[in-house]
């Protein structure tokens, strides 16, 4: 027979360990790329708010913001994320 091979117990165990380790490594690599793509998509869809955007928001409401107003708003937004 062409495809019949006999494995010793050690050979079979070594092959099984190799397949398991290969699957774990392959899963980690695929998981890394999927996670990276998801994070990039989230940042593109929901970019973080910058001080420049807060300044523009205050200006659109008709008031000139002080630096303390901007810092206070940034701290409030960071606290709300937690």
Image: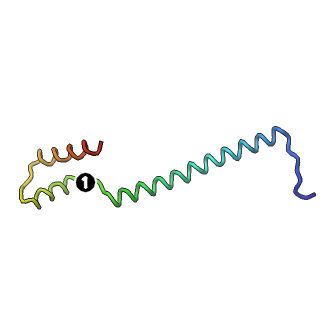
Image quadrant in which you'd find residue 7: top right
Residue drawn at the location 30% of the way across and 42% of the way down: 82
Q: Is residue 53 above or below residue 70?
A: below
In the image, residue 61 lies at what x, y percent? Answer: 9, 59
Residue 21: image quadrant is top right
Q: Residue at x 71, y 44 (%)?
A: 18
- Residue 24 in the image: state x and y as whole percent: 62, 46
In front of the other: 30 or 80: 80
Q: Position of residue 76 (x, y in %)?
A: 20, 44
Task: Name, please, the residue furthest toward the right.
Answer: 1
Identified at 61% across, 47% down, the residue is 25
Mark 1, residue position: 49
Instruction: Tell which of 82 and 44 is nearer to you.
Output: 82
User: Left or right of 37: which side holds 17?
Assistant: right
Quarter of the rendering occupied by the N terminus: bottom right
Q: Residues within 10 Å of mark 1 (few under 14, many from 20)?
A: few
Color encoding of the figure: rainbow
Q: How many marks?
A: 1
Could you say where residue 45 lies in the image, as x and y percent from the top left?
34, 60
Looking at the picture, tell me which residue is in the foreground, 16 or 51. 16
**Residue that lies at the very extreme toward the left in this rendered image:** 63
Relative horizontal placement of residue 4, taking residue 62 as reference (left or right):
right
User: Which residue appears farthest toward the top when viewing the image?
Assistant: 10
Horizontal side of 67 relative to 50 (left or right) equals left
SS assignment at label 1: loop
| In this picture, residue 26 sits left or right of residue 11 | left
Say which residue appears at 7% left-offset and 55% top-offset: 64
């Amino acid at each position: 027979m062409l495809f019949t091979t006999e494995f010793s117990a050690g050979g079979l165990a070594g092959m099984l360990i190799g397949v398991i380790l290969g699957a774990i490594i392959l899963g980690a690599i695929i998981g890394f790329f999927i996670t990276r793509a998801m994070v990039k998509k989230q940042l593109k869809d929901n970019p973080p708010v910058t001080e420049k955007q807060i300044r523009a928001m205050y200006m659109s409401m008709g008031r000139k913001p002080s630096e303390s107003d901007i810092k206070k708003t940034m701290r409030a937004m960071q606290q709300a994320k937690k």
